[in-house]
Image (tube, rainbow, N blue to C red):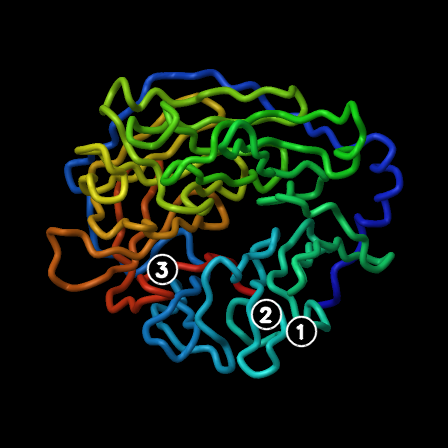
Amino acid sequence: MVHGRGRVAAFCVLLAAGLLLAAAPIALAESTAYCPAQPRVMRERIFEPGGLILTAFDRSGLWVVDIEGRTRYPLENTRICGTNCRISPDARTVTYLDGEEELYRRMTLDGVLRDTLYEDTASDVQYWSDDSLLIYTAGQRLYLQGTSGLVELDNHAVVSVQPGGFWALALDYRDGRFVRQLVNLVTRRAPDSPHIDVGPEARYANAAAWSPDGTRLAAVVPVAEDAASGAELVIANPDTRSVETVTDLTAEYGPLRLGGIGTGGVSWSPDSRYVAFWGAPLTGPDPEVDVAPASLYVFDTQSGETRSYCGVTIEDHTPQPPRLVWSPDSSHVAFAGNPPDDARGSLLLALDVDTGVFTELTAGMSSLLGRPNVLAWGTRP
């Protein structure tokens, strides 16, 4: 493995034109409840898809769950991490913070092959493309790393950057409150630079994530000015300069809190087709405490269908619900949780999004930064 490189070489061309990516139009459809007769099952001897899942079973460091081998084992010289453990676009490696050198490194999911991503201290390192990296320094500066070295990007009020492109989700302070908008980092200082308002920044209604192909941003937007009246999912498209509300959950289920505090409450499938999120019914005016157990929802960007799944609910979802991590083939979404009707503690569960069946892969999950979590699901090296 080598340092990030490649697509930054085209940076000068993109400076002239920005980057506008095409996306398929969204057709909104009714929601569908997936409630199979046997919603939760124990895994069979062979579970498809296979691969390796990164998580933890104690606080000593990261662990690997080998699905095909039906084993789990710790990885030496690793630290418990949250969102800083990121799967590569090809699902073969994952970023992590070295337990001794305080440097960002990457490794194959079995922990065998490792190399250093960035030779200096950093607050975060992300994949921008297959072979280029976004570097957030300890001084809150943002660089794009490739064959031409480090190219600094405008990091003012930036929340997240488009994979493979130069659009970013940023915050804009207006009339006493923050508004989320898409800005072009190449042209944002020009007087006529385009921006796209996504929605207000509200407590417990601020989750957002770029699709892996970089074409769209999924975001949770409050129905009213705050999250007390519930929220819906919107899809923003830099190419068409559009923001479309793609769910109508409030009409069907009453007000729901989608995700938790922070941006990590929505999760795209690797093929950029599905968006998974937790929805918790609101029972009163405070979205932090007045919430019922959360259920899992998946929005299909191709059909416009919103799927709700009946097999598992989660009570421990504040301030953050369990992290949702997709299988490399986009057929399953995994999470760690302790269903209220189960006394065995936290389980590693995988939902088949087509059948609605939750498979129990293993038990004994341990807390990661306050709660059990799944970090990554990748392929064998």
Q: Secondary structure at mark 1?
A: strand
Residue 359, position in %: x, y?
Answer: 27, 51
The kind of residue tagged 2 is Met
Relative to 88, 265 lies left or right: left
Residue 92, quarter of the rendered image: bottom right
Compared to residue 285, the image places residue 212 above or below, namely below
Q: Residue at x 77, y 57 (%)?
A: 145
Residue 374 has which mark?
A: none
Q: Secondary structure at mark 3?
A: loop
* Residue beneath disc 3: 373
Mark 3 or mark 2, earlier in chain: 2
Residue 255, position in %: x, y?
Answer: 26, 27
* Quadrant (top left/top right/bottom left/bottom right) for the N terminus: bottom right
Q: Residues within 10 Å of mark 2 (few under 14, many from 20)?
A: many
Q: Residue at x 15, y 37 (%)?
A: 37
* Residue closer to the observer: 71 or 224: 224
* Residue beneath disc 2: 107
Q: Which residue is at the far front?
A: 176
* Residue beneath disc 1: 115
The kind of residue tagged 1 is Asp
